[in-house]
Structures are given as structure tokens and as C-alpha cells.
Amino acid sequence: MDRMIYTAMSGASQTMERQASVAQNLANVNSTGYRAEEQRLRAVQVIPGAGSTALPTRAFVIDASTHTDFTPGPLQMTARPLDVAVQGQGWIALAMPDGSEAYTRDGSLHEDVNGVLQTRTGIPVQGDGGTISIPPDVKVTIGADGTVSVVNESGQKNSVNAVGQIKLVNPPQAELVRGDDGLFRLRSGAPATTDPNVKLADGYLEGSNVDPIEQMVSMISLSRQFDMQMKTLTNAQANDQAATQIITNL
């Protein structure tokens, strides 16, 4: 009975954590460039302390790791000049306020009031020489290698000028960790090196890689699993009360 309580209690707690991850995925079904996450659990035996003669009969269920599904999402055509999607594997580098780098697959870019190329959340895109500034009254195009070029809309319209190149990286997936802001960073905290093999598709955005049907099935399964674990706790309580009653009547 003691072992039953430990297993059911920790299992119910971690099932709730998995339900939170599934809910997070479902909430981001339509988020550009979102990567689905998954909680992976494992059982750990509780080892008695030094000098104890108790047997290791108890086990906890703990969160082993948070896995990220890096499968690319579907490309959606927008025909907007500042929309870009990473083709295949790779990431767009961002210049964070603290001087570090973060990485995203959300290529819905914008200009701020000063012409700095940034994400919808206001984080500047990392260029080959810092942030990328776009002059006023120009037409912007972004090449497959991340080169940002502009053409004057007045005066000499045939003059094409490159104002910067978006930093594109492709570090090993095992070295990437997701932050609380949804952006990815290297586990070491160091900036990733530029990968010339990473290519962009101009006028496209990458959709979320979350499968809503699969996530709904997981949510139903986890709900039933949680109910089963709570029922196990109820049975353990009933058994305890029955045992107490028998001892009392002796």
C-alpha cells in the first residue's frame, strides 16, 4: 500500500505537468515557427539512507527531460517582402538586449521607427555586422542567403544596395535549449557560428509543427491516466481505513 501511494502520487503530479505541455502545444497550433515540446518521464527507486535496513520498495515518477520536436513545419505563402521562412534545418539569429544571441524560426520581420529590422516582439535581427538598418523610401528584398537588399523608390531606381546579411545558424539540436520567452539558445551560452548552407524562402512563413489531432488524443489519454492514478490513491486510502478497522476490532 505504501508503494502504491508513492507511485500514484508522483505519477499524478507528473501527469499534470505533461498536460500543461500538451496545453501549451495546443495554444501554439497557429504560432509561426513554433516547435512542439514533450515531457518525458521515468521511474526512480527511492534508496533508503545509510544504515537503514529498509528495502527499496518505493518508487517515484520524475520528469526525465523536456524534449523538443525539431521537425520543420509547413511553409505558408504570404508574398510579403519581409516574411522569410528557413528551408529545412537552421535558425535566424537575434540580437538580445543583454548582448547574447537567441534563435527563432519565426521569420515575420518588421522595421521599427528607426528602420531597424526586428521581430514582431521587437527583438532586432542579428546581422553580419550587428543589427540591420533599412533606409527610408526603399523597396526591400531578402535573398536566400539572408542578404537584405534595397532599391530606391525614387531617383535612381536601378541601383541595388545590400544593407546587411541576416545571420543564419544551424547548431546541433542537442545543444539547443528553449527559454521562457520561447526562443532557443545554446546550452553553453556562446553564439553559434554562421552556416552558409542555411537558406531562406522570401515571401513565406513557416507554420507550427504541432499536430492538433495528436495533441488532443494525448490530452484525453493523460486525463484518463490522471483519473486512474487518483482512483489508486482512493483505493489506498480505503485499504488503510479497512486495515485500521480490523486492528481496532482485534
Image: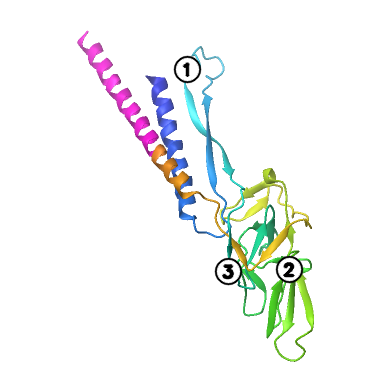
Does 235 lie within the magenta span? Answer: yes
Please name the residue shown 68% across and 43% down the image: 174
Which amino acid, by three-letter code, is at mark 1? Answer: Thr
The C terminus, quarter of image: top left
Report x, y in % for residue 149. Answer: 75, 75
Q: Residue at x 75, y 92 (%)?
A: 155
Nearest-to-viewer mark from 1 and 2: 2
> Could you say which disc has been placed on residue 57 in the image?
1
In this rendering, position of residue 99 left or right of residue 24: right
Q: Quadrant of residue 82?
A: bottom right
Q: Residue at x 51, y 11 (%)?
A: 53
**Residue 2, magenta (yes or no):** no
- Say what secondary structure mark 1 lies in: loop
Q: Which residues are magenta?
A: 223-250
Q: Mark 1 to mark 2: distance in Å?
A: 62 Å
| First in sequence: mark 3 vs mark 1 | 1
- Residue type at tag 2: Gly
Look at mark 2 in the image and give the residue it sits on.
Answer: 143
Nearest the eye: 44 or 71: 71
The residue labelled by disc 3 is 78
Q: Assign a secondary structure to mark 2.
A: loop
